[in-house]
Image (spheres, rainbow, N blue to C red):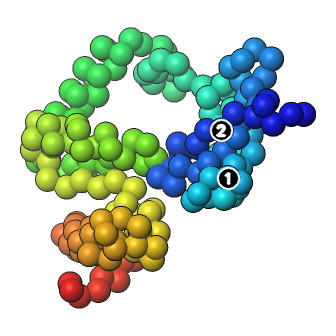
Amino acid sequence: MSDSEWHPSACILCECNCGIEIRLGADGHTFERIRGDKAHPASQGYTCEKALRLNHYQNGGDRLLSPLRRRPDGTFEEIDWETAIREIADRFAAVRDAHGGESIFYYGGGGQGNHLGGGYSGATLRALGAKYRANALSQEKTGEFWVNGKMFGGGVRATSSIARWHCSWARTHGRATAFRVPAPR
């Protein structure tokens, strides 16, 4: 197998964006094989299982291609996007009306979706009267940024403010938290 059959790319399933190389299947769409890219400056050939299973996530036979709504008997029916968005908005509004907007916690996602929370969360929070939000940095990725200091010119200050917010939210809502927050610099 020649090196020209391998195409450099990057995994997008978390914020690390590890370098990978992909050998395409005969159809030019499926991934026949995936391996770590040793020339990638950050990951240097490392990949986790998620990156090695990208073909499954992108081309898997069980992949959802449209919204599904649960029927009363537990089965699902396919619905259009406009209906799905309207029904979800109505259910959020019902929670807001019954319990107040502060009972809604907005989570902005992980991977490449981390930036989407910045674009949409403000309008969503205002529409629902919600005040609390988080993303992958506030839980699953906090330690990485804290230890490695990769973000915001050192990481500790930015991450500790996220951790302080998370602890504050957890105390307010009676939830345990695993964060130990250092004093501000």
Residue 137 position in % (x across, y down): 37, 60
- Secondary structure beneath label 1: loop
Q: Is residue 22 left or right of residue 95?
A: right
The residue depicted at 42 percent of the width and 13 percent of the height is 79
Kindly identify which residue carries mark 2.
8
The residue depicted at 86 percent of the width and 34 percent of the height is 2
- Secondary structure beneath label 2: strand
Give above or below for 96 relative to 84.
Answer: below
Separation of residues labelled 1 and 2 (CA atoms):
9 Å
The residue depicted at 16 percent of the width and 33 percent of the height is 93
Give above or below for 126 relative to 87.
Answer: below
Residue 118 position in % (x across, y down): 24, 44
- The answer to the question of whether label 1 and label 2 lie on touching residues, with beta carbons closer than 8 A, is yes
> Residue 42, located in which quarter of the rendered image?
bottom right
The extreme right residue here reads: 1
Residue 157 position in % (x across, y down): 26, 75
Q: Is residue 149 left or right of residue 121?
A: right
Residue 126 visible somewhere in the drawing: yes
Q: Nearer the viewer, residue 139 or 69?
A: 139
The residue depicted at 66 percent of the width and 44 percent of the height is 20
Question: Which badge, 1 or 2, comes first in the chain's sequence?
Answer: 2
Give above or below for 102 relative to 121.
Answer: below
Kindly identify which residue carries mark 1.
39
Residue 106 position in % (x across, y down): 26, 48
**Residue type at tag 2:** Pro
Quick one: quadrant of the C terminus?
A: bottom left
Quick one: quadrant of the N terminus?
A: top right
